[in-house]
């Protein structure tokens, strides 16, 4: 993975010092609340429902064990509110029915960042200094700027990869970081990049979605889509270029963002994302971008053209780590032990099938540690868990891990010989749920338990579904299904792209939930990216699990085929339409409590 | 542009008194600089306005005026000009800025000295990897 050089280190330290100076000026009144807010946001500091929230950037999802240990330390030493803050938070949430608000935790987000919910703002500067010791920061994890770039969780290790997207993601990280022209865009701006045939980065749902492709001559470049996004108006990105030579990617993105910065709406934040500009202007937007790109290259001299030497310099960081055991043939004894254990242990068998994926190196595997289990929210990790994950990452994955946009952790460099000891260790930590891509591997935002924007809580819904579906046979019978839960229309829980989406809405101060079906993130198993459609009026919190149960029962009764030929949930929804599901879900409503 | 040239900071009073013989062209925040090539070319000073510091359009205008139109005169930031955005202004081609009333000059100057260098090319300098390649 990328290693910071002296320049990068000095840069992050300067940023931490700058933020300390800004906090001091804000505290003594030289910097007004309004002037300070965007600065703290662009350093990852929000003010949430009960307390400040810190979002730490994990560029394209890659984390080292050393970084995991510092995140563990932040959770242990700093993620603790003042007593009165915590008491007020508990009192407020108790009225809604929440009895547990974990502290000393980190949370993996759908944009592969890490959040902390309870760090007092007075300790903000110290935490930033601590993060800087392992090259971490919160730069551009919030605010109306170009955000952290997300990527394929299997970048550089997937067998279906055309080219490793990480060198490009790193070049983009550098180019976007403190870009002087684009710190105050009309709205936030998100880029996703993948180099694989399978789209595991939901590129169609991003402001800019990039897929590495070869042209007819075998040259490497990007397919560029622009104007995807969730929120109030879900839109799938428009393809602007089927092929753009890789060396021009920064020039081209500069053209896209410049046109957006100049013409994106600033009068209404719900119409300010680039998707609205692309939708309203259509071909005129595309023409403007192409003309701007041409002028950047021809008149400005292509200031961001990537030289081969720079690409090679950055690529050198992304070689296979020597300690991965790459190429070492499997040990027959280890293989026999694994086979014997799997034969005797159904959980292990299922875990091998669900959480272990092929690697481009036949002697290695890609392993998912599932953060979807009872008693903890999706993507939540305690300080101790982070510490122990760091140990696993050192022991089994060349000291490198990935945060996934489905809120799990992936170990990209696991030797086949190590699968049994890794499973045993993960099981002991409660991180071996064999549920990758199954119903309980759901995405959920923190929702109304933490977030100031939320209209309803997400976590009680996630918890109810998790508790109801603990039988792995039943889960496997239902098959692969994406359940995505958002606590408000901002869609951090990606409900639009869920095969089943749940959206929290507020009706007269009460929590209600819209259920959508048929959404897709654009992966092969989900079909072309598209938003789900609503199946009627909202459900109350306690109706949601019954409604989902009714939808699933309907699917099981309608699906065709058997065994590997069995029709998946999303395919059945697309074949038969919403009506049977709507009828089944309607039948479980307890009408007395049903709001129109 | 000379690498050692730093953005010139003015108080509102100094800006008001700055009625030298300059021919000033003030470009509206939502105007396209390329539609005003002649006016810009004939001006000795172009003024760009920040209605709020969070409105970033003038940064793109500045880039286009300095880099695309190769304007060589004074490019001045007016309006909601605060200390923490001055470095962005300098990097997109502004040569002077009128600090909003109440901004301390020392706070403003300190923000300009914060970073030795940046990752990406801007109007003033090439990206570090390009500068290294030229050495």
Image: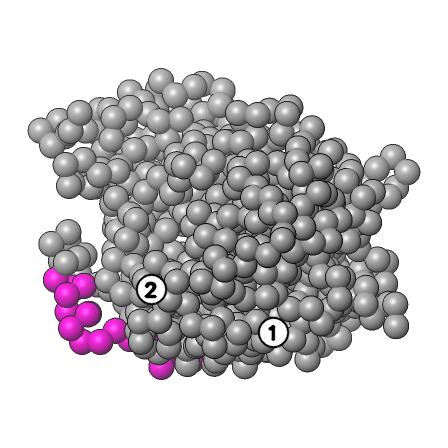
Q: Quadrant of the C terminus of chain A?
A: top left
Any mark on residue A32, and which? Answer: 2
From the top left corner, tell me how far across and down residue A192 is, in percent.
Answer: 60, 48
Disc 1 or disc 2, which is closer to the eye?
Answer: 2
**Is residue B62 magenta-colored?**
no
- Quickly name the residue at label 1: B115
Subunit bearing disc 1:
B
- Asked where in the image residue A174 lies, by quadrant, the reply is bottom right
Foreground: A565 or A326?
A326
Tell me which residue sits at (37%, 66%) in the image.
B102
Kindly report the distance in space between the C-alpha atoms of the residues bearing marks 1 and 2.
23 Å
- Asked where in the image residue A72 lies, by quadrant, the reply is bottom left
The magenta segment is A71-91
From the top left corner, tell me how far across and down residue A436 is, in percent.
Answer: 49, 51
- Residue reaching furthest to the front: B21
From the top left corner, tell me how far across and down residue A489 is, in percent.
Answer: 35, 39
Residue A434 placement, left or right of B34: left
User: Where A585 falls versus A445 (above or below)?
Assistant: above
Foreground: A207 or B75?
B75
User: Where A596 falls versus B119 (above or below)?
Assistant: above
Secondary structure beneath disc 1? loop
Q: Quadrant of the N terminus of chain A?
A: bottom right
Foreground: A366 or B2?
B2
Tell me which residue sits at (35%, 27%) in the image.
A534
From the top left corner, tell me how far across and down residue A386 is, in percent.
Answer: 45, 73
Would you say the residues marked 1 and 2 are in contact, meaning their CB atoms lie under 8 Å apart?
A: no
Subunit bearing disc 2:
A
Total number of numbered discs in the rendering: 2
């Amino acid at each position: 993975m990328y290693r910071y050089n002296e320049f990068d280190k000095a840069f992050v330290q300067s940023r931490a010092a700058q933020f300390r100076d800004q906090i001091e000026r804000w505290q003594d009144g030289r910097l007004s609340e309004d002037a300070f807010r965007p600065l703290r946001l662009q350093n990852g500091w929000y003010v949430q429902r009960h307390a400040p929230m810190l979002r730490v950037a994990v560029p394209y999802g890659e984390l080292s064990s050393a970084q995991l240990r510092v995140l563990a330390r932040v959770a242990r030493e700093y993620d603790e509110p003042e007593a009165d803050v915590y008491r007020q938070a508990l009192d407020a949430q108790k009225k809604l029915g929440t009895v547990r608000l974990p502290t000393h935790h980190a949370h993996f987000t759908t944009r592969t960042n890490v959040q902390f919910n309870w760090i007092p703002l007075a300790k903000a500067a110290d935490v930033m200094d601590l993060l800087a010791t392992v090259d971490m920061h919160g730069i551009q994890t919030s605010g109306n700027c170009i955000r952290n770039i997300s990527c394929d969780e299997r970048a550089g290790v997937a067998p279906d990869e055309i080219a490793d997207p990480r060198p490009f993601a790193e070049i983009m990280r550098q180019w976007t970081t403190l870009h002087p022209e684009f710190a105050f865009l009309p709205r936030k701006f998100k880029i996703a990049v993948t180099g694989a045939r399978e789209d595991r980065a939901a590129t169609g749902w991003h402001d800019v979605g990039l897929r590495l492709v070869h042209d007819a001559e075998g040259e490497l470049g990007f397919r560029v889509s622009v104007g995807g996004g969730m929120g109030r108006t879900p839109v799938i990105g428009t393809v602007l270029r089927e092929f753009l030579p890789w060396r021009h990617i920064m020039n081209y993105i500069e053209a896209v963002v410049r046109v957006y910065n100049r013409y994106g709406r600033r009068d209404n934040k719900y119409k300010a994302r680039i998707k609205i500009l692309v939708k309203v202007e259509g071909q005129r937007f595309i023409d403007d971008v192409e003309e701007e790109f041409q002028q950047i290259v021809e008149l400005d001299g292509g200031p961001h053209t990537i030289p081969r030497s720079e690409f090679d310099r950055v690529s050198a960081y992304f070689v296979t780590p020597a300690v991965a055991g790459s190429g070492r043939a499997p040990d027959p004894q280890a293989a026999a032990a694994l086979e014997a254990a799997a034969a005797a242990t159904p959980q292990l068998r299922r875990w091998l099938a669900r959480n272990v994926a092929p690697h481009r190196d036949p002697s290695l595997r890609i392993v998912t540690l599932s953060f979807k289990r009872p008693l903890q929210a999706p993507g939540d990790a305690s300080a101790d868990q982070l510490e122990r994950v760091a140990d696993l990452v050192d022991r089994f994955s060349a000291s490198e891990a990935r945060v996934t946009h489905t809120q799990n952790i992936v170990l990209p460099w696991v030797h086949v010989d190590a699968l049994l000891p890794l499973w045993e260790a993960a099981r002991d930590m409660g991180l071996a749920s064999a549920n990758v891509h199954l119903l309980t591997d759901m995405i959920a935002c923190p929702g109304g338990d933490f977030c100031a924007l939320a209209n309803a809580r997400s976590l009680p819904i996630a918890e109810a579904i998790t508790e109801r579906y603990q039988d792995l046979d039943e889960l496997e019978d239902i098959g692969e299904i994406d359940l995505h839960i958002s606590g408000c229309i901002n869609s951090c829980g990606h409900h639009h792209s869920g095969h089943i989406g749940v959206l929290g809405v507020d009706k007269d101060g009460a929590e209600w939930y819209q259920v959508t079906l048929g959404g897709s993130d654009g992966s092969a198993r989900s079909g072309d990216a598209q938003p789900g459609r609503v199946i009627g009026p909202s459900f109350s919190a306690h109706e949601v699990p019954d409604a989902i149960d009714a939808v699933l029962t309907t699917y099981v009764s309608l699906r065709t085929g058997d065994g590997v030929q069995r029709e998946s949930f999303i395919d059945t929804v697309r074949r038969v339409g919403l009506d049977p599901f709507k009828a089944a879900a309607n039948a479980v409503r307890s009408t007395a409590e049903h709001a129109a | 542009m000379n690498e050692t040239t730093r953005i010139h900071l003015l108080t509102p009073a100094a800006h008001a008194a700055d009625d030298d013989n300059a021919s000033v062209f003030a470009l509206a925040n939502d105007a396209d600089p390329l539609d005003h090539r002649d006016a810009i070319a004939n001006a000795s000073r172009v003024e760009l306005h920040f209605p709020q510091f969070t409105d970033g359009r003038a940064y793109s205008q500045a880039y286009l005026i300095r880099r695309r139109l190769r304007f060589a005169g004074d490019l001045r930031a007016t309006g909601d000009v605060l200390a923490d955005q001055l470095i962005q202004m300098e990097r997109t081609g502004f040569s002077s800025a009128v600090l909003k009333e109440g901004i301390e000059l020392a706070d403003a100057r300190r923000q300009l000295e914060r970073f030795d260098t940046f990752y990406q090319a801007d109007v003033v300098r090439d990206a570090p990897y390009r500068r290294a390649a030229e050495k």
